């Protein structure tokens, strides 16, 4: 097969943190190359480099025989590289034909858009791709699967030669998924080179010719699908030295099931979740990006309001209607979006730490008490600041995270929700945060920890609740923890289970 794309020794860093290490990739005409790897493996960064959205620090791109050090998005499109991301990029209020010809309209008399001709040409394209879509339909009337197909039709209108599909079936039902797979097979037979990203192993083994595995930004292996197995692929994705694990001192679960969540739901993102957590327990919440983990804990904290279901603590209904209600009932939520939701970046460490406790004062701030509390927290958590008045935006990621945590330690609630607690922090700060979590467990607090990092979940959790597509799949006991087993639970689609 004729090679149309080659990446050699691609490296990329963000703010000094390396995310890709000497990655190599080759794609030929008529080939489906699957990218596989855990959350955070580097897949998204790699396809952004291919699409021109990001520039590599070093390395070489060869496209149809020509070498490039970097490219712009428009240049990538001109070279026939089209990327279709998981989030649909269409204008709902326009027709199918309008979307296909957007910014490339057919004109008559030099200045009038020829709508009739656009509809005719768009319908011809859709029919050639065996898509059951009417060109004059409004995009808002299409199903998720039809919208995904429409994005592919737009790519073909742009004369795509290299098509990159990022989790294209994530929001599709079984029939729509099968239709999309048939379409991808047709495009491969027509000679397109396709890079296909999916967490679903059945899709990889159905569609793929080759699979490239990334882990922690490293190129682990490239294998022919015909020469590998699901177990081998999972091992490639998760195999690592156990020295990466944090060693907890002890486990403090009291087995009292003090926190009970019953039938909690909100739309399609969280559906009918029931579970219980004991005092002294750290319950890990795992799953792929988009599984509904953050959406679930936001309902418990009151950051979003549940449409149905209850949250009880020691038999008392504490289902929050808003964040203040959650705080009043002893729920502390450390958001994964530290800069957007967790901190007031332009305010001081002192103000950020003291704000929750001060918010309970009825009349006036007790400034001497606030100063004392804040200094104790800074010392206890080893927060590196010149003074409590230092602006939080000037602190490192690890120290910002400790500021966010210390605020809730002062609130002294019963339930602590850590959403991606080690995101964007170095190893030293990470272990300090883990120590804080251990101390809270020892005090009998209830801890829920959302994490995309397998080592973090296995190191820190007493049990792990696995979520997939908005539902609770199972709760795994510590004795059954293994990366291979958890990943299988993550990536076995609900569609696969329905077929069994």
Image: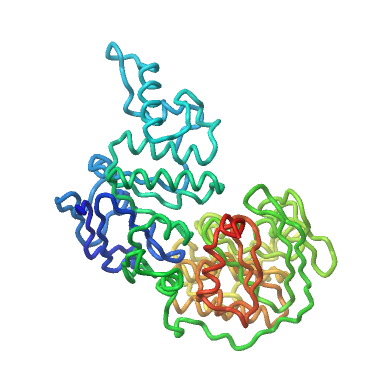
Give percent across and percent down for residue 164.
35, 49
What is the quadrant of residue 296 in the picture?
bottom right
Locate the N terminus and report the quarter of the image it occupies: bottom left
Asked if one can make out residue 302 in the rendered structure from this viewpoint, the answer is: yes
Residue at (58, 85) in percent of width and height: 248
Q: Nearer the viewer, residue 333 or 232?
A: 232
Locate the C terminus and report the quarter of the image it occupies: bottom right
* Residue reaching furthest to the top: 109
* Residue reaching furthest to the bottom: 249
Q: Nearer the viewer, residue 114 or 69?
A: 114
Q: Is residue 24 above or below residue 153?
A: below
What is the quadrant of residue 158 in the picture?
top left
Judged left or right of residue 93, residue 12 is left
Q: Nearer the viewer, residue 371 or 385?
A: 385
Q: How is the image coloured?
A: rainbow
Residue at (85, 67) in percent of width and height: 315
Give percent across and percent down for residue 21.
29, 68
Residue at (32, 44) in percent of width and height: 82
């Amino acid at each position: 097969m004729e090679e149309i794309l080659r990446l050699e020794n691609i490296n990329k860093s963000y703010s000094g943190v390396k995310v890709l290490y000497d990655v190599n990739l080759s794609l030929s005409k008529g080939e489906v190359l699957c990218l596989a790897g855990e959350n955070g493996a580097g897949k998204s960064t790699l396809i952004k480099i291919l699409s021109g959205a990001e520039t590599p620090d070093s390395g070489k791109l060869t496209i149809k025989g020509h070498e490039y050090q970097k490219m712009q998005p428009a240049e990538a499109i001109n070279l026939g590289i089209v990327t279709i991301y998981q989030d649909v990029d269409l204008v709902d209020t326009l027709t199918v034909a309008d979307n296909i010809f957007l910014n490339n309209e057919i004109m008559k008399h030099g200045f009038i858009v020829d709508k009739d001709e656009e509809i005719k040409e768009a319908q011809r394209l859709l029919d050639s791709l065996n898509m059951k879509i009417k060109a004059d339909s409004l995009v808002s009337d299409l199903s998720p699967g039809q919208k995904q197909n429409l994005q592919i039709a737009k790519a073909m209108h742009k004369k795509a030669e290299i098509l990159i599909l990022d989790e294209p079936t994530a929001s599709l039902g079984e029939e729509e998924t099968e239709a999309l797979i048939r379409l991808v097979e047709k495009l491969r037979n027509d000679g397109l080179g396709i890079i296909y990203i999916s967490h679903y192993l059945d899709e990889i083994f159905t569609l793929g010719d080759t699979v490239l595995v990334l882990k922690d930004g490293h190129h682990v292996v490239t294998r022919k699908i015909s020469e590998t197995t699901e177990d081998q692929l999972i091992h490639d994705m998760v195999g690592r030295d156990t020295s990466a694990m944090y060693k907890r001192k002890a486990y403090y679960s009291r087995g009292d099931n003090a926190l009970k969540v019953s039938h909690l739901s909100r739309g399609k993102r969280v559906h009918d979740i029931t579970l219980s957590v004991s005092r002294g327990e750290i319950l890990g919440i795992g799953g792929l990006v988009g599984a509904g983990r953050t959406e679930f804990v936001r309902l418990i904290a009151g950051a979003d309001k549940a449409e149905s279901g209850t949250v009880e603590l020691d038999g008392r209904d504490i289902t929050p209607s808003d964040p203040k209600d959650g705080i009043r009932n002893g729920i502390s939520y450390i958001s994964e979006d530290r800069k957007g939701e967790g901190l007031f970046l332009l305010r001081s460490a002192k103000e950020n730490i003291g704000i929750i406790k001060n918010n309970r004062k009825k009349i006036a701030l007790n400034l001497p008490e606030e100063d004392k509390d804040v200094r104790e927290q800074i010392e206890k958590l080893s927060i590196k600041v010149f003074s409590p008045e230092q602006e939080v935006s000037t602190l490192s990621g690890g120290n910002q995270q400790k500021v966010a945590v210390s605020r809730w330690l002062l609130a002294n609630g019963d339930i602590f929700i850590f959403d991606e607690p080690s995101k964007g922090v170095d190893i030293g700060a990470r272990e300090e945060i883990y120590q804080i979590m251990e101390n809270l467990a020892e005090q009998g607090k209830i801890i829920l920890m959302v994490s995309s990092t397998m080592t973090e979940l296995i190191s820190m959790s007493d049990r792990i609740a696995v979520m997939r597509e908005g539902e609770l799949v199972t709760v795994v006991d510590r004795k059954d923890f293994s990366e291979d087993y958890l990943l299988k639970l993550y990536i076995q689609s609900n569609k696969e289970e329905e077929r069994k």
